[in-house]
Image (spheres, coloured by chain):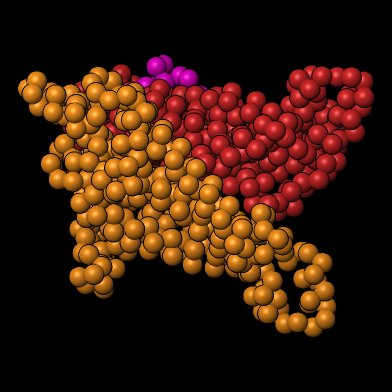
Chain colours: A red, B orange
Amino acid sequence: MAIQVVPAEALGASSTPGEGAGGGDDLGSGRGRALRSLLRNPLGLVGAGLLLVVVLVALLAPLIAPYPPTQVHFDTPFQRLGTKGFWLGTDDLGRDLMSRVFYGTRASLEVGVLSVALAVVVGVPLGLVSGWWRLLDTFVSRLTDLLLAFPFLILAVGLAAVRGPSLTNAALALGIAQVPTMIRVVRAETLRWRGADFVTSARAMDAGSGWILGRHILPNAASAVIVQATVIMPVAIIGEATLSFLGLGIRPPAPSLGIMLSDAQQYIFRAPAAAVIPGVTIAVICLGFNFFGDALRDALDPTTSSR
Amino acid sequence: MARYLLNKLWQAAITLLLSALVVFVGVRLLPGDPALALAGEEADPATLAQVRTDLGLDQPVIVQFWRFLSNLAHGDLGTSIRTGTPVTDLIAATLPVTLWLALYATVLAVVIGVAGGALAAVYRGRWPEWVANGFSLAGLSVPHFWLGLLAILYLSVSLGLFPASGYVPVTENPLRALYYLTLPAVILGTALAAVVMRQTRSSMLETLSTDYVRTARAKGLPRARVLRDYALRNSLIVVVTIIGLQLGGLISGAVVTERIFGLPGFGKLTLDSVFTRDYPVIQAVVIIVTAAYIVINLAVDVLYSVINPRIRVGGEA
């Protein structure tokens, strides 16, 4: 199930200003160092490689899929792995599993990207604002606490009940569920940099709050936001599969890895491959994001790279 | 301490009231006429009017909200459209299943997660760390409902180790209940165990590198005692935090796990109510989950201050 990775801030770990990547305003060399560190991390490279393949498959699905994902072949149901023409086999309706996996990957990434976008668009401004203005902080932090551990599935259930199940509603529920962690991460970054010398000097030069937040704090918080996005992606992708599996997400016959697993459950003994392949695909996508995200975190934040 | 608790209780009450308001508004946002939805599409006008009066839909909104709250306070959650039974009966029948499942899964996850995380930190750079890291990464990358399908396929059907579905109440036969719940609990607990393991490891590594641990070792305290009294105690705080934060994941996970293993629990009730548009049940489910979530978080907060008095934010510490 969707697991929220607990940000270090939530556990009381604090970072001191000045210890961050390149001391904050020294971003240029910081980026070069981060890139070198990323390239030296074998798991990070594996993750990047997996992600490249996954993204290519998703983008090129219409070109590389042997069949349309919903095309049925009633004469050839339950083909085995490695059958000529259906290399990953077929399901109960004779639909080509490889084509469905390709299109399912596309749907997974679509939901992932939509939820990350929602979390960023809502979470980043709220995080900045609550880290900067104490008065708003009380309100936003209460809201965050309230939402942080609330079961996203109940949210999805509510949305599905009110608006009907769909890809957009699944992404909406998953995105809303990720907003609080994003707020916390950005808020912690804002608190971390608000006392930095370059912020004090910007203030001394009469810069407005909006300017400081946008020009000084946001660029420094960017790496934390990017890392958090790599954490959200696999959570959202597993979440989509779960919702679709339960019938609360993408509607059949549209291809989704979760729907494929839900279908496969009915004939799991007859065609075990149909139940294994979509799951492996989800695992590969998520491992890619987790490997890459971990390496990215180590590369962007030298204080944790020793772990 | 008393002031701290009162403050927390007050906050919990506010949160509960707010969530009741959200549910109240949410139900009124549902497409179409709630009376029609409640009475069913084929209801005749007389029934419809009766439902409308029962629901108090002819009253002003404030009065409606008050009635809603007062019904809630009296434990009246309405009647299920699908089965015609009071919602409280449905919940009383299904909730214990889920609570046992969640409890069992949490215990498994904490035991495995803390042990694995501690081993990984102590044997840093050696194989226990690799195994623990591999497990926690896999646990975060694999949808656990899929693990459930595989477990049924291989552990239940091929090897016959565990039943693929079914449920025995704990009160009826505790041993058989344990037997039936083991596989679902393992599947539900996997993700939680992965997170607990990951955080225990990094928390222990952090503690082990602090000055006070070095001092304790230098003055001759045995390694085992330092690990137990310093490192493990600190990681307990982490575990409690995670359980609070992962509660939502656990509840969501229970819904899926029950579906896969055919357990007659609260999650099944939730899904059934959505698919049959059984609004009173949906409404009750949301309120109960929210209340449970608030109560458990309150418990986590209190537990916190017991384990680590420094965290008593609102208190005199």
Which of the 4 quarters of the picture holds residue A164? top left
- Please indicate whether residue B111 sits to the left or right of residue A275 in the image: right
Which quadrant is the C terminus of chain B positioned in? Answer: bottom right
Q: Quadrant of residue A255?
A: top left
x, y percent for residue B185: 35, 59
Tell me what residue is drawn at x 64 percent, y 52 percent: A11
| Dominant secondary-structure state across the stretch colored magenta | helix
Bounds of the magenta segment? A55-65
Residue A140 part of the magenta segment: no
As drawn, is B240 to the left or to the right of A244? right
Depicted B240 relative to depicted A261: above or below: below
Q: Is residue A124 left or right of residue A67?
A: right
Any part of residue B145 in sight: no
Question: In the image shown, does B141 or A235 lie closer to the viewer?
Answer: A235
Q: Answer whether residue A60 is magenta in the image.
A: yes
Question: What is the residue that sits farthest to the top in this orientation?
Answer: A63
Closest to the observer, A65 or B144:
B144
**Residue placed at 79% from the left, 22% from the top?**
A209
Which corner quadrant holds the N terminus of chain B?
bottom right
Measured as percent of width and height from the top left, residue B240 is found at 55, 59
